Image: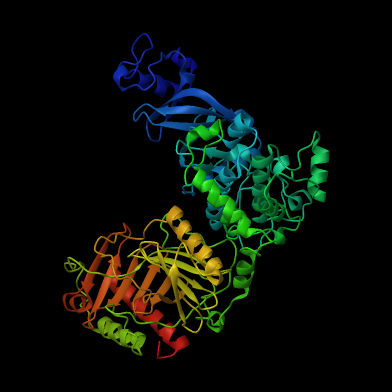
Amino acid sequence: MLSTVTKATRQVTLHVKDIVNDKGKMKNKENMKDPRIYDVKDPSAFIFNPTTSTTYMKGKLLGKGGFAKCYELTDLKTDKVYAGKIIAKTRISKPHQKEKIVREIELHRTLDHKHVVGFHSFFEDDENVYIILEKCSKKSLVHVMKNRSTITEPEVRYYIRRLVYGCQYIHSQHIIHRDLKLGNMLLNSNMDIKIGDFGLATKVDYEGEKKMTVCGTPNYIAPEVLQKKGHSYEADIWAIGCIMYALLVGRPPFETATLKETYNRITHNKYSIPPHLSLEAKKLIKALLSNNPEDRPTLEEIPLHPFFLSGFEPKHLSDSACVSAPKFPITSLISSNRQKSNADPANQDGVNKITSSLAVFRTQSSKKVLNSQTKVTRKPPQVPHKDPTYPAVNPAIHPAMHSTLSSNCNGVTTFNGTGNAVALCQVLEAFINNVRQDCPDNPSPLVQSNVLWVTKWVDYSNKYGFGYQLSDRTIGVLFNDGSRICRSPDGRSVHFNDMTGKLCGFTMDAPPSNMEKRTILLSYFAQYMEDNLIKGGHDDNMNMNENWCSNIFMKKWFRTSKAIVMYLNTGTLQINFFDDHTKVIITQTPHSEYLVTYIDQDRQSSTFRMAQLQYLGCSSEIVDRLSYSKEMLLNIIEIEGEEV
């Protein structure tokens, strides 16, 4: 009998002898989550990965598509359950079909994000190609819509925001998905959106490249794709508009009985929006479904639309929302209605004024070029990957230097004397010239040090500014016009400094009318960093400052091809390196002693006295990074002058 089966099947049969008894039952039922009877004589019930010597038990069918069927697969060693995409080789006999599968694997395996279906492994045997993926136990938004028909606007905010975050990451990896639809929006047990199926995805090889292939699901295809005008990232934004419409209305916007009529409506932008939708929802749908790709909002702009800022959005959804409408707290809905009335055009222009005005704010310093190696690139958006302290895209972009005035506060050393950068540059020069070169290891770090540093950052300087979080949990935004806003670690107090340095203080829940828009933007930056970013290192030694004030803030920042450079008004210099995600932070104590904090690839930080490093020696990693720090300081001094 063995002679009639494939080699892979023989391996599976031999492997399961240790797991299954002669009657086909699992030997150790205590370790089984699902003690069913399996027929060992049916080799198709088991799948063997010869590379890892892993055997999977095939369970129920989860779904099927053009080339593949997706089954529940259980790793018999770990009992972990996956979704296994099984593609019969007889279905991909043509070269272009094989290329499609290879491209899907090559693109998906590089992705790792909270809102993208996890890629585990892939392998093949004589009959099939297997792609092992994260299993999303709550199925997809298609299944939600089958049970619900339509969903509420708070739920739509929840789903669309997370879809946008996932797309931001995908685009930051220079990938266009090209098949965003309800069926590819999967849900895990925590009701997190997971973008799946990269079968039609494509890589953008250079900025401005337009793809010409007509592909996608008919109800979600963008007009520029149909018209073969060339398409790019904006095609995914169109699909987000179709998804939002479908969630609120119960069907895609251009759906008809025939493919020809559907394509005709897409081409001519013919669709209707039911009157019961909120004004903000209607406006966002119209913006997303703009016929001209350039008129659609960017992925950074979507979460700043009044639809998100003027209505209630749950932080979490119960899995009961898959079958029935959730019951939100009355207080949340009342607050939501109050916010909607405030955002109505009859009362005010809403957030649109601030977002449009901030978009044109530019300081003279942002026009300065750091060196001839920098270049401008605007797409894809700058979105942090797993480590938020480095961007997931080409870092060699326009340096967008910013400068602000500093202020003093009792009890906190700000070092506002002139020449901080010059003094530090001289110290680094002496260090590099005199440090011991024969020491492979670092000396013992300080046991405790209150080093304040940037733990998270997000770059929206193409429209608003640069947001950051300090290790004491202060949240700040350096706007493109040179003004700045900071929120206290407890989230209650806010300080705003305009372009002249004039200070305005207020509480987060009661901002002055002229500060409402900037406070909303501050909240968005804070929420984005809280939801999507992890700390770039541990900050166990950082003590919270009970007498917080806003005198410590980001003064300058810029990018190079190797790193992002951040300079605080206290004279603290922080450089986050892109390649290995290490960081170096140089600070000065009140006693004029310089400290060096090094955060390694595992996000573990160590702080040393610079004099100690120079005398005892240190690793080449630290020496190289301090040498680079000196070069960055020279650039700052060259641009801003010696009084920086």
In this rendering, position of residue 352 left or right of residue 78: right
How many dots with numbers? 0
Q: How is the image coloured?
A: rainbow
Position above or below: 170 against 218: below
Instruction: Give left or right: position of 618 versus 131.
Output: left
Q: Hey, which residue is sitting farthest top in the picture? A: 23
User: Could you tell me residue 244's position as x and y percent?
Assistant: 64, 45
In the rendered image, the quadrant that contains the N terminus is top left
Q: Nearer the viewer, residue 162 or 395?
A: 162
Q: Is residue 494 above or below residue 212?
A: below
Q: Residue at x 35, y 81 (%)?
A: 630
User: What is the x, y in percent for residue 210?
Assistant: 69, 58
Side of 238 where 410 appears, left or right: left
Q: Against 358, is 345 above or below?
A: above
Where's residue 455, x and y in %?
37, 63
Whether residue 599 appears in this view of the structure is: yes
634 or 496: nearer the viewer = 496
To which quarter of the image does residue 589 belong? bottom left
Q: Residue at x 55, y 77 (%)?
A: 481
**Image quadrant assignment for residue 323:** top right
Question: Which quadrant holds the C terminus?
Answer: bottom left
Residue 191 screen position, x and y as percent: 49, 39
Report whether residue 312 is seen.
no
